[in-house]
Image (cartoon, grey):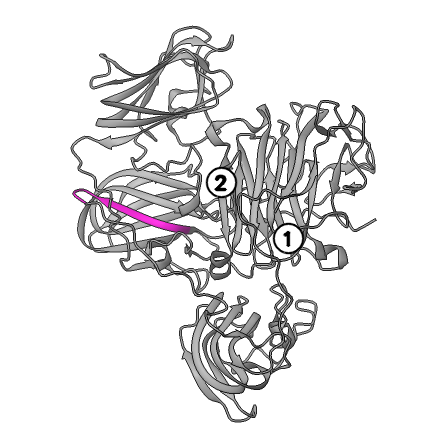
Amino acid sequence: MPPPGRRRRLAVLATTLFALVASSLTTSVLSASAADPLLSQGRPATASSTESAAFPASAAVDGNTGTRWSSAFSDPQWLQVDLGSTATVSRVVLAWEPAYARAFTIQTSTNGSTWTVVHTTTAGTGGTQDLTVSGTGRYVRVHTTVRATVWGVSLWEFQVYGVPAGTGCGTANAALGRPATASSTENAGTPAAAAVDGNAGTRWSSTFSDPQWLQVDLGTTQTLCGVTLVWEAAYATAYQVQVSTNATTWTTVFATTTGTGGTQTLAVSGSGRYVRVNGTQRATPYGYSLWELQVRVTGGTTQPPPTSSPPPTSPPPGSTVLLSYRKPAVASTSQSDVNCGSCTPDKAFDNDPATRWATSSTTGWVDPGWIYVDLGATATVRQVVLQWDPAYATAYQIQVSADASSWTSIFSTTTGRGLRETLTVNGTGRYVRMFGTARVGPFGYSLWEFKVYGTGGNPTAPPPMPPDPTFPATRLVFSDEFNGAAGTKPDPAKWTIDPGTGQNNELQFYTDNANVNMDGAGSLVIEARRESAGGREFTSHRMNTSNKFHVQYGRIEARIRVPKGNGLWPAYWMMGADFLTGRPWPFNGEIDIMEVLGRNTLEGYSTLHAPAYNGGGGYGLRYNAPGGADFAAGFHVWAAEWDSRGIRFTVDNQTVFVASKDTVETTRGPWVFDHPFYLILNLAVGGDFPGPVDPSTPFPARMLVDYVRVYQ
């Protein structure tokens, strides 16, 4: 039996997934992404009644999706919020608890007594309803007339978006390209300036402590009317937005202790030259990280979005080729110990992003440190690509030589930033060297990849890559429709059953095919049960396509209905196939197409795990179901469209997350997903990520899979 597919997560995964790619993001309906700001959060709220003191009106406007307002068990009922001043209202979001209203109206008022209807329905669906409205008023009310249940009506959140009247709030980003500073930075690859550069693929991140701040100098005193924060997964639960005329004395214009991350569009009022986000409580063990800090000012005008040059081409265009693949390499020292086994010079030239060279941990944490490659013959060098480990050089040279003795510098910097650096150079020689003279920290030098492009030399061509699919991909290369008779087991020609225990402090034992069968209606049923086996209190099922079907690139999709209940953790994911031949996780790479936590089936997760970003620091996104649906209420199609440029994750054909290879390499670390993977389906119980089961968790719990398909 092949080694089991491993699931390794940290408890903080739920909050640290997910670097936001704002330019291609489908935003949570509870995290505003509309042009108009959220006006209602934290404003005074009143209601016709409350079920008890535990469910006050204020709980529906506190920004906390774990608290709610609930009414008495009768019709009609209402909840209203005072926006503080008259506003033009453009959007209302209702996040219903299961006790929802079938018939209701949205109303506005200037005085809290005379109301104008701006939306009405007699066919309310519950869940999250995102309503486009048009009206003006200081007060906004949801007025319910018919309940959908015998209980009252209950809202997790009541969000009102619009523009305060008479503010003339501009749409231009006054912070774009302005000088920015911060209390700290995690590394040189995440500077303060990255949060105001207009690039959704770059970010600021701080060190791992509280408090931390990021501020921008607008150049002159401005009257602020809005701030947008685009958080990376490492967001703040408690923070303030502050303004100052001198960067010394600060006035708070917005404060929260229930930050939700994602994209937060805030209506603010204040004046200052300097704008600061002051984080006082982190949501994760990591620091604070913002993809973008945007500021809108009164009287601002619309400006076109900033343009940027395309990322450097690697390899460069023209007749140049990769010269350095598997060529002999020499370094000042190398590391081979428990922390970095066989981190020898050749690893920087093997075209394998999961292996690296590092200087010796006993003699190599000194300056200078160097590594060179023998191209086999004299070459003209046009480009060098360095993919740094966090132990990178802040000052270094790229040098060439005819004899590996006398060196000529063709590139020099004292501001190296780590991660991936693509250098345009021009030089001639047989040998090419990176000569480091200053390290970023106390450790040595380390490179995942050192690629040399040019002409001449004696190049060895790397193995060819498969062609990229053209999407929408239509050539079916693998499928299982699960159309067998009731009680039929998975097809052994397609699936390997993977019994045993899980990781991450999970509670289940995966049985050998006892917890899975066809239902006779076209679905595979994976069942978690409360029963003892293998020393565990629960049983479930896990299976994969290892050694039966491996794939590199294509559309990988499945139609799945997930179970609801605390502690349940269904997943559809992939592991790098080199795991089967001994490469450990996360060096083989892991692609999580779908994970849903049974405690909140309104949300899903898609994530990548690699040596430089894994577990709680994985690169991915938490997202709400399209249209505010409940993933447990029906089937949904999760898919990953994967090629050599990245992976686009979709739910029901709506993009929820895009992982760009270029962005990952320049902001997080090596991209380890250009090789074959195999598919995995499982239903876990308990553990660090989903949390514990409780008496309300239904057993048996069932994950239904209508089909699994792969197209190229």
Q: What residue is pinned by disc 1?
A: 552
- Callout 1: SS: loop
Task: Give the amino acid at mark 2.
Answer: Val
| View extreme (front): residue | 475
Q: What residue is pinned by disc 2?
A: 656
Query: How many residues crowd mark 1 within 10 Å: few (<14), some (14–19), many (20+)?
Result: many
Q: Position of residue 177 (x, y in %)?
A: 28, 57
Identify the residue at horizontal 25%, vertical 44% (top origin): 296
In primary-sequence order, the first of circles 2 and 1 is 1
| Placement of 526 over or under 102, stated as above or below | below
Query: How many residues crowd mark 2 within 10 Å: few (<14), some (14–19), many (20+)?
Result: many
- Callout 2: SS: strand
Q: Specify start and end residues of the magenta stretch as a single range.
A: 290-300
Image depth: mark 2 or mark 1 in front: 1
Nearer to the camera, 683 or 573: 573
Nearer to the camera, 149 or 521: 521
Q: Is residue 370 on the magenta stretch?
A: no
In-image side of 425 versus 368 (left or right): left
Question: Residue 197 occupies which quadrant of the picture?
Answer: bottom left
Q: Position of residue 20 (x, y in %)?
A: 45, 47
